[in-house]
Amino acid sequence: QELDNEGNEDDEHQSNRTPSDVWEYMDKVTDPENPKCKICNKGFSAKSSTTTLRNHIKKYHKHIHREANQTTLKFKSNITSFYDKEKNSEFVKLLIKLIVIDMLPFSLVDSIYFIEFIQKLNPKFKCPGRTTLKNEVMSEFNSRRERIIDFVKNIPGRCSITTDIWSSIKNEAFIGVTIHFITNDGKDFDLKQKVISVTTDNGSNMIVACRLLKNDFDAQTPALDFIHSRCICHILNLAVNAGLKYIENLIKKLRKIVKSIRRTQLYLEELERLAIAANHTFKHPILDVKTRWNSTFLIAERVLTLKEDLSIIKSRHQPLQDIWLNEREWEKIEHLVNLLSQFHIATTELSTQTYPTIAYARVVLLGLLVDLNENRNYNYPLSEVLLAIRNKIQEYWVHIDKMTHVPAFFDPRYKTIAYKNLEINEILEPIRNNFPDSALSNLPSNNSTSIFVQRLSSVRQQRNANTDELLKYWESADASFDIEPLSWWHAHSTEYPILSKMAQNYLSVQASSVPCEQLFSLAGNVVSKKRNRLDKDTTRACLCLRSWMIEGIE
């Protein structure tokens, strides 16, 4: 590197300025060999480095040097400010996610300890106050809502919804709606032309609301068959509770035994020692919740599991002997567990996170009725319980049959077993009535039922290329139980072009209102004692955002 006349290294690339910064104040146009300072006309040799020229400005024209530095700093500050603003926005979005999903109070951001924690992590982050944060939550809700509305409007087929009502601790009522639909591989949402079913509990308010909704939908789209699907899990709950009324005293005795064990530390310690001695995992006796029949099943099941060890403890303690069940009562408990186990399995399967559809629910209920009929005899220890459960399911069967008949037909795994004891015309006619208008011209008209029967009576008859889709599908073998129905229809969409599109509509009908109930299952934490000042709009935004964020809906 060259040394200038002041002995400094000419290292332009290490300077925080470009050469153009210096030449802005130097004149080399008049005499390129002898540049001059534009401010004081001092001349320099052609070999003078930019560092020499810059040092002249710095030494003799300090005000110019200061202004130049301020311009550079301002430029850097603008870059940093832009970067910090972008980062701050990302942090705010993560903060919204934390508050909404974990249902934390907005006042968290006003906590001096939270602020101290955040400042330690990132001193540059400007944490918003509770009011600003609330506004950010509402903004995020509104923007996501608009995107969801646009998405829902473009659903290729029809959709089904579930709905439920919830009241906050402030006694404010909210109605929740979940939308279910199948892709190709309310009013605000423009859904009136799309909704095919609503799944609700059996509350009288929901029944009336859906009747009004059906009238409204029928008036606008009379060609479409709207389905009010009553939650199968609620129906099973009503049925089992109807049966349990006949053994209330037995359940009370069982509950008394469990309470005695749970509140006596000596019994629990002995029970644990017996489990350890037998190399078993210690299982704590559980109590049931009177309003939930499945918890009654669980308490009975647990007591039966512990019966042998409990009998040993009972032999040592008179208080337990005084409340112990006799052999006949223990026999009834065993039969009760066997009976309710099927309903427990059914309810669990119909309440899973994958949300089984109404087609599977029909098969489940028919299977339960078969079991109930097989055990129907007057020597059965719980004949009254069994009969009451069976009668309650039969009471609802008119509704169940109507709401499951068409959707079940489109599940290729169950299409024949789902219609036990029904004539072929009873099965196919409702399906035909739901064919889209554009497809009816391809189907036999009016007296088609007799044609169906005639054609089905001769299975060996060779089908021609124009064979009706409906019959062709019905006569085909049921798919394997492990086949995913949507994948099956996708693979057979060319073979059944009309039915595959109908399947896209009906296979989304939900078996229970569990999806919507789960929306509200944690709602009490959204409007908790620490968040009881949330207004309706903010509560709504937090509930919806939480659901959308968990489901990954952007």
Image (spheres, rainbow, N blue to C red):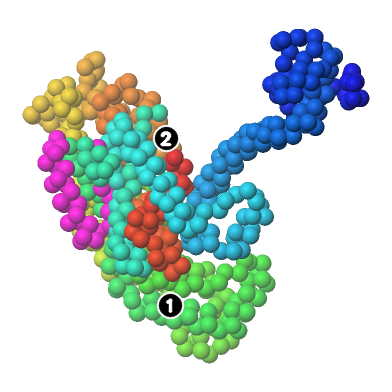
Q: Which residue lies furthest to the front in this view?
A: 40
Asked where in the image residue 465 lies, by quadrant, the reply is top left
Between the C-alphas of marks 1 and 2, the distance is 43 Å
Kind of residue at badge 2: Ile
Q: In this view, does 531 lie to the left or right of 275?
A: left
Kind of residue at badge 1: Leu
Residue 222 lies in magenta, yes or no?
Answer: yes
Q: Is residue 450 above or below residue 393?
A: above
> Label for residue 254?
1
Residue 483, position as x, y percentages in the image: 42, 35
185 and 249: which one is in front? 185
Q: Residue at x 22, y 20 (%)?
A: 467
Q: Which residue is drawn at 47% across and 53% down?
A: 133
The tag earlier along the polypeptide, 1 or 2, is 1
- Magenta residues? 194-223
Q: Is residue 344 above or below residue 307?
A: above
182 and 534: which one is in front? 534
Q: Is residue 358 left or right of residue 528?
A: left
Residue 75, position as x, y percentages in the image: 63, 33
On-image quarter of the N terminus: top right
Residue 149 lies in magenta, yes or no?
Answer: no
Give the SS element for disc 2: loop
Give the SS element for disc 1: helix
Residue of label 2: 483
Q: How crowded is mark 2: few (under 14 residues within 10 Å), some or many (20 or more)?
A: few
Residue 267, position as x, y percentages in the image: 58, 82
- Residue 453 at least partly seen: yes
> Label for residue 241?
none
